[in-house]
Amino acid sequence: MKKLLSLTLVLALCMGLAVPAAAADNLTAGEYLSVSCGDRMTAAIDTDGVLWTWGSNQYGLLGTGTEAVSSDTPVRVMDDVVSVVCGSNHIAALRGDGSLWIWGSNQCGQLGNGGTGNAGDYPSDYQTVPIKVMEDVAAVDCNITYTAALKTDGTLWTWGNITHGNLGNGYTWNATRGTAACQTVPVKIMDDVKLMRCGPDHMAAIKTDGSLWMWGDNDTGALGNNGEYDRTIPQVYPLADAKVQTVPVKIMDGVEDVWCPADYTVIEKTDGSIWCCGRVYDSPFNEVLREGTDVPVQTSLRNIVAFGGQAYLTENGELWMWGRPVSQMTPVKVLDHVVGYSGGLGGNAHYMVVRDDHTLWAWGNNDEGQLNIQGMPWWLEQKEPVQVLDNIAGAQAAPAPSSPTVAGFSDVFDSDYYAEAVEWAKESGVTSGTSATTFSPSTTVTRAQAVTFLWRAAGSPQPSSTVSPFSDVSDPSAYYYNAVLWAAEQGITNGVTATTFGTGSPVAYDQMLAFLARSSGADTSGGSWSQAAIDWAADNGLTDGLAFTAKDNCPRADVVYCLWKQLA
């Protein structure tokens, strides 16, 4: 119960106003979705891999070739389906062969087929039967009017509504036309992605090295980058310009999972801590949180149920909820043995839960038959969970996106910009990695490691004196002992004080580039040494393709990349 209350606190701190939007699903790392709620409709996969839909058929959402006639009983759509996710008015299904199929509204190109449909109606065409859009897909997610796909090679693709820069391809609101711009075919955004999430107006991706990248609407600080953005877009409501980030920006390292509700973001790091950023509304806890502030809480993000931030799933499968889903202001246990879930946001929401006995339970709004309760009057709302189906698939493991690895390291891929440098560094004896199978490319290099890399690249020359002038470099058997003495003799770097070297201190980019410059005989002395080192590196092509600021911590990948550019 203590763990439950701690998560209640963080969600109360992080929660923004829920807006009518796409379903909020349990798209956790390494799992497929077996049930998803759209706008007044539901889609679910049974244990045989058959996809069924029911509820509203506006825009052909049921996928049966017709439109407008709702169904309060399931209709069969297609076989061999492993994952399904609903936007507001479109649906994406992933089949066992890796093919991606989409149907429903194509108002802003969210189907990814060039903006066409097999039916026509205001405001746009729509597709009443599934169409194949892409192959070799590992995961799919979508939100109100856009879609994202993660392919098996780790590449991330997006398409659809681009108004808030949420596609990450550098474009946003069409200021000339005064309308939203649309991307009607998939566009590649980035490589080496292992997990992605679609929020209503912002998006997140975790790369294979554990780094978190985000983009989209940053009006509320939901991107967690101190409110920075690359452009503004005109807004009617409210009467102000919105701040948006139209290309991915790196937020932090060491990330395990991420969740993107409206106006805020929740992040789980690999150390188990939870971080929250974005809009915060009045609450008893607002004195400890302000917009854009990161608040760590020890728990597991995989147990957060995305019903507008008002639920929690315990480790033994108990579903606790509060707020509108259960009409309670404090958490109450709703169901146990829960393995899958989906729910809408807003006043007409409905909720679906899969239990470990493969039964499907439903409650909430039923005005279009979306609960699958035959004979229930449209104006009634189901207040308590009721079993509506059995034989529904539970959580399924999804294969992780793959890319060929380099030099025997599981965390370095041949598509990485530093791949060739890492291979060179291992073959040259500069570094053998942090273990037999890991290189840890995003880990910050220390002063001891940095001069050791340089020393080994120079052929491991013996220093003139074997007596250390530094009190923290006293063990001749330490891997860095001769390297530190050599670096000091060569004028590459002195200690952090007159008597200490600072072996464990992190190295910034300008410091690393100064080490390299001095090892090559360049002069980076004086008060402007930092800029002199950066200019020297740029003039010699060492930093081509790197994005950094002088005082950023320099990761292992970029140290060997610059060394490789200089020496290889």
Image (spheres, grey):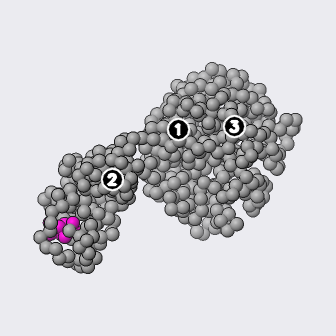
The residue tagged 2 is 557
Q: Which comes before the other along the chain, label 2 or label 1?
A: 1
Cα separation, mark 2 vs mark 1, equals: 27 Å
Indicate left or right for 264 with 514 as reference. Answer: right
Which amino acid, by three-letter code, is at mark 1?
Answer: Ala
Q: Secondary structure at mark 2?
A: helix
Indicate left or right for 231 with 420 as reference. Answer: right
Which quarter of the picture shows residue 377?
A: top right
Which amino acid, by three-letter code, is at mark 2?
Answer: Ala
The residue tagged 1 is 138
Disc 1 crowd, CA 10 A, few/some/many (<14, 14-19, 20+): many
Residue drawn at (43%, 44%), measured in percent from left and top? 192
Disc 3 crowd, CA 10 A, few/some/many (<14, 14-19, 20+): some
Residue drawn at (65%, 50%), measured in percent from left and top? 306
Q: Nearer the viewer, residue 447 or 497?
A: 447
The residue tagged 3 is 47
The magenta-colored residue range is 483-491
Q: Is residue 245 magenta?
A: no
